[in-house]
Every structure is written in structure tokens, then in C-alpha cells.
Amino acid sequence: MDLVPLTVVPVWAWVVVLAGVFGLLGTFVAALPRAARPLAAAALAAWVALTGALAVGGAFVEDVPWIGPTIVVAVALTWLGLRRLGSGVDLVALTAGQTFRVVGGVFVVLWLVGTLPPAFALPAGLGDIAIGLAAPVIARRLRRGDLRGVRAFHVLGIVDLVVAVGTGFLSAPGPLGVLAGGPTTSVALTALPLALIPTTLVPLSIAVHLHVLGRLPVAGPVGLRS
């Protein structure tokens, strides 16, 4: 595999993406039972290091890209871990952590400067911004035991991510790249730091949405660790 350069996007994008990804990781770990936090933090750090190394090594731009299977594996592992911890996970904190989805706004800016295609950047970026802005409101409702809009928020959060992943693939060169043309997602999104969004932020968020949706029928009041 050929090494992928680290200068595909400007420095400001590095700062924004890393702040968003590690902010989400931090709130995710904080939502777990205290005893599970060290292991979870170590596992997530190892995952970021692994996917980062794969991105630098060019694994995500091979003829058979590994980014799709990487997302599936990450969703499954995270969801199973949350399921195992069950009621010990704080649903309010998990929901509030989705505030860091506003990092998706970086896609819109990179479209404006010609780095990403609009077919991907606009739905993915604007959808993430909407979810990120709504997250604190929904988290406050959830803390009060008010479930109005909570289920819809988490369903729409999944829909947004599915649309983002789908348009990402459709905007890349290849047999499925019906939206490819001009700038594509095959360069910026498969290199650091943007590669951390589909390999870490996206699967973590999908697993969070699924876990909260699965817990809502039996959720209790403040903290929802009942």
C-alpha cells in the first residue's frame, strides 16, 4: 500500500475534526459505568490508532476499500459492548455526546473550497449540524423523563449517518460512484483526519442511537441508569 499524505485538508480542519472525534469519545466513555471506563478508553484509543494507521497506509483507497467493513465491525463491537453493560450506561450522557456531531459542518466548508463534492458534503454536513444542535435539547428532556421527540431524534440520527455513508460511497469513483464527478470522497475522506469520521465517529454514533432506542421503553428518570 502507498502512504497517503497528511496534507489533503488544511490545519483548521485537523483541529475541528480531532476536537469533534475526541470530544465524542470522551463523552461516550463518561457515560459508561466507572469500572468499565479504563478498558473502554484503552479499546477506543487502540481503535483510533489502528484506523489512523490504516488510513496513512492507504488501506481505505485500495481497489477493495476496507472502510465499509471497518464501519460494520465498529458498530457491532460498540453496540455489543453497550448491550453487555445494559442499564449501567447513562442514556442522557450518550445523547448529549451527539452534540459533537456538529463537526460534520467541516464537510460543508470543504465543499465550498472545492475539496468535497456537494452531493456528499451538503446532506452529510447539514444533517450532522442539525443533529448536533438538537442533541442538548433532547438530552435535557431525557434527563427530566420527558420522552417527547427522543425516539425521533435517535431515528433521524441513524438516518443522517446512513445518508452520509451512502452518498459518500456514491460520490467515490467506482461501479457505485453514480454521483462522482469533479472532487470525490475517495481522497479527503480516506485520509487523516477525515477518515476518523467514518471509521470512528459514525459507527460510535450509530451504536449509541441503537442502544438508546433499545432502552427507551424501560428508561427511567434522571440519568436513566435504572
Image: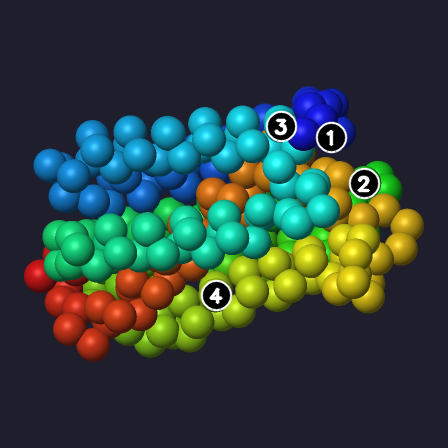
Residue visible at 69% across and 58% down in the picture:
169
Question: In the rendering, which numbered label is found on residue 1?
Answer: none
Q: Mark 4 points at which residue?
A: 158
Split into 4 quadrants, where in the image is the N terminus? top right
- Horizontal side of residue 38 vs 141, given as left or right: left
Dot 1 falls on a residue whose secondary structure is: loop
Select label 4 or label 3 by which is in front: 3
* Circles 4 and 2: CB atoms closer than 8 Å: no
Does residue 16 appear in this view?
no
Secondary structure of the residue carrying tag 3 is loop
Which label is found at residue 9? Answer: 1
Query: What residue sits right under mark 3 in the picture?
Result: 57
**Against 33, is 49 above or below?**
above
Q: How is the image coloured?
A: rainbow
Label 2 neighbour load within 10 Å: few <14, some 14-19, many 20+: many
- Label located before the other in sequence (1 or 4): 1
Question: At x 29% / y 62%, what residue is drawn?
Answer: 211
Between the C-alphas of marks 1 and 3, the distance is 17 Å
Q: Is 8 positioned to the left or the right of 152 in the image? A: right
For the residues labelled 3 and 2, the Cα–Cα distance comes to: 21 Å
Q: Residue 137 location in percent, x, y? A: 39, 59
**Front in this rendered view, residue 14 or 207:** 207
Q: Give the label, 3 or 2, closer to the camera.
A: 3
> Which quadrant of the figure has residue 215?
bottom left
Q: What element carries label 4?
A: helix
Decide which of 21, 98 is in the foreground and name it: 21
Q: Position of residue 18 (x, y in %)?
A: 53, 30
